[in-house]
Image (spheres, helix red, strand yellow):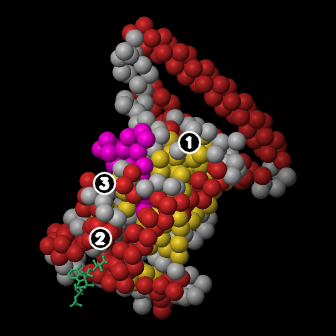
Amino acid sequence: MPKFAHIVGWGKYMPETILTNKDMEGIVDTTDEWIRTRTGIEERRIASREESTSTLAINAARQALTVANIDPLKLDLIIVATTTPDYAFPSTACLVQDALGAAHAAAYDLSAACSGFIYALSMARDTIVAGSNRHVLVIGAEIFSRIIDWKDRNTCVLFGDGAGAVLLTASEIPGGVLATSLGADGSGADLLIIPGGGSRNPASQETVAENLHTVRMNGREVFRFATRVMTRASKEVAEAAHILLEDIELVIPHQANARIIESAAKSLKMADDRVYSNLKRYGNTSAASIPIALCEAIEENRIHPGDHLILVGFGGGLTWGAALVQWEVSIPLTPLPRWKRIWYSLRFRWARVESFFRRAWRWMEGLPRTPMGQTRFLWFKARDGLNKAGKGISKTGKGVAKKAEKAGKGIAEKAGLSQSGEKEE
Ligand code: COA
């Protein structure tokens, strides 16, 4: 039975609109200098009106599947860590599952604020190690710009929007997510909270008037808590994985405040080049910050096979968590062949068609037998026909893909090239 959970795919999606510190000066009583020196943030991304947490998550997930070269039908589970779901329910994960065409995957959201991604990674790893799942998609996605009070300078300068995703796969090769360490302290629940909109203070005219649907934060307390738990969680997870802190090549911390990151690095005795940060470009993207940073560390060639990484985060709840990853996957030196990228893009479009037919099918099932009985009958026929056609297309597609792969390998062999495109010795 496979005992290890490896990260084999990764992807991120950042909204296009950039809001700089200078722009913030026009919104609240603040300065670029204050934000930069107190937080390390220079700009953040803001989602457009057309975007929601699920659309950000879907884009990141599609990339992760394409990098991993794994068909969405193979997914067993999708976990979306988010504090800003599209709806209270259904879960954002279900919307992602539908958009990807991951028909065999279970899906749920996980709420652990900024620690959500580490919590989700831990759950995903455990189900793989236990043998319950083979392929699990873990996504951190947030649109914090919709839940902050744009008049509160204490919070609105800190957060941004974005999504990151990783695909975990079962393997017998030692490595992957070796250990995780999670923690919580509910006595600090009020330090970082959205008081309105839940069962305690259901949405009402009063809650809206009092602005209870936006983030409230005690910055100083959260700061002190964060510096404490970042070090503690990193040490605990290294111990659990039997890896010395000296042997950690890169720490990827939650991107909340440069001073918190520096303080943790100092107490872990890690030099700056062993701690990754992209905070200045995105601000705090909550549950999305660690997978986005992981993607960018990969893009910047900061991660290599055999490296040991610590991913560590903290957040509302209060919650914290760390994961120790032994990276075993070689980063593709050349991008996926064009035909394969086209194939995946068609695959995701087909998922939308499938979703449309599933909705139409449900609508037809609800029709009364008479006088629409005949229409229902015709619909059954049409659906069966479409199913057959779909299976045919899929079979032909797979055949073409196999032939193209074979032909590609033949050409590469003749040219004396390895699969990655490098000349073989
Ligand atoms: N621009 C200018 N002044 C600001 C400001 C802003 N955007 N935000 C706060 N201030 C003011 C405060 O009002 C305060 O003024 P006062 O002394 O007159 O009351 C002053 O700056 C200093 O506040 P203080 O809380 O001491 O600042 P700080 O150095 O602790 O930095 C945070 C504040 C919020 C940046 C810092 O506490 C922090 O990062 N905390 C952790 C937050 C976090 O990570 N949250 C997410 C968890 S996942």
Residue at the extreme top: 414
Q: Which residues are magenta?
A: 290-312
- Label 1 amino acid? Pro
The residue wearing badge 3 is: 274
Please say whether residue 176 is visible from this viewpoint: yes
The image shows residue 288, relative to residue 423, as above or below, that is below
Left or right of 259 in this view: 314:
right
Q: Secondary structure at mark 3?
A: helix
Mark 2 vs mark 1, CA separation in Å: 32 Å
Q: Secondary structure at mark 1?
A: loop
Instruction: Give the camera-side residue of 8 and 175.
Output: 175
x then y, percent, for residue 116? 50, 65
Is there a contact, CB below 8 Å, between mark 1 and mark 3?
Answer: no
Left or right of 196 in this view: 357:
right
The residue wearing badge 1 is: 174
Quadrant location of the C terminus?
Answer: top left
Is residue 416 rendered magenta in the image? no
Q: Earlier in the sequence, mark 2 or mark 1?
A: 1
x then y, percent, for residue 61? 49, 48
Please say whether residue 94 is visible from this viewpoint: no
> Are there few (<14), some (14-19), or many (20+) residues within 10 Å of tag 2?
some
Q: Earlier in the sequence, mark 1 or mark 3?
A: 1
Quadrant location of the N terminus?
Answer: top right
Quadrant assignment, res 394: top right
For the point 57% across and 20% down, the residue is 402
- Label 2 amino acid? Ser
